[in-house]
Image (spheres, helix red, strand yellow):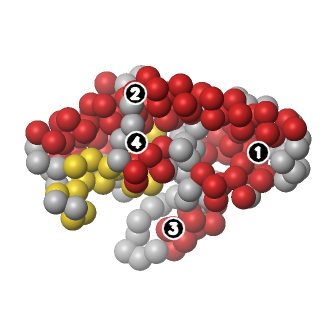
Amino acid sequence: MTLENLMRDTCYWQRLLRLGGYEPGKIDGIRGPKTRQAEERWHKDADAVLAAYGRYDARSEGVLMTLLPAAQRVARLWLSLAVPAGKSAGVDVRLICGTRSYAEQDVLYRKRPRVTNARAGQSMHNFGLAFDFGLFREGDYLEKSAQYNVLGRLSKQIPNVTWGGDWKKLVDTPHIQLDLFGETAAVRRVFESD
């Protein structure tokens, strides 16, 4: 999902803006003045995070732009730790997934073998608060590598972050999420409220 795609679903975009603290006005699917002002504040904050932490590869940058600016800060901070650690281990670290629409989440939920236990609205990816990373060697994606654990654990140095490698069910070592708003069900209630 790209930021442009997120913005096309105006109601979804307005909900993300509101969740991030950018008041878009009524959730009505209309990109009126309040929504445009909220977008401007989102972009201004995202630009400030970029200036503070630097730019990464094009794929990671595309993923970063879909995250709430607070989650962009976490992801860029984590990348500042993981990219050099990955290079010293002979792997390139890239973000491969950020915000997912409810429809995208349900497609992944139905996929076999099982990719996720989360249906639409049950993943922090749906709220711009989670990202997945991938490891690459000479451009080839590494599906398995001990470095997923090593690099994922770096997220434990960042406050208010959960690493999927610590989960008991469906351990998800490439998954990192910002936990500012409580459990997923609580975030969903706020996100879906009008």
Mark pair 3, 2: CA separation: 33 Å
Disc 3 marks which amino acid?
Answer: Tyr
What residue is disc 1 on?
14
User: Quarter holding the N terminus?
Assistant: bottom right
What residue is disc 3 on?
109
Q: Position of residue 45 (x, y in %)?
A: 60, 28
Query: Which residue in the rendered view is the most extreme toward the bottom?
Result: 112
Q: Would you say the residues marked 3 and 4 are in contact, meaning their CB atoms lie under 8 Å apart?
A: no
Reply above or below: 18 against 174: above
Q: Would you say the residues marked 1 and 4 are in contact, meaning their CB atoms lie under 8 Å apart?
A: no
Mark pair 1, 4: CA separation: 24 Å
The residue shown at (39%, 31%) is 54
Reply above or below: 30 against 26: below
Mark pair 3, 4: CA separation: 18 Å
What residue is disc 4 on?
176
Closer to the observer: label 2 or label 1?
2
Closer to the observer: label 1 or label 4?
1
Quadrant location of residue 165?
A: top left
| Foreground of the two, 48 or 180 | 48
Q: Is residue 98 visible?
A: yes
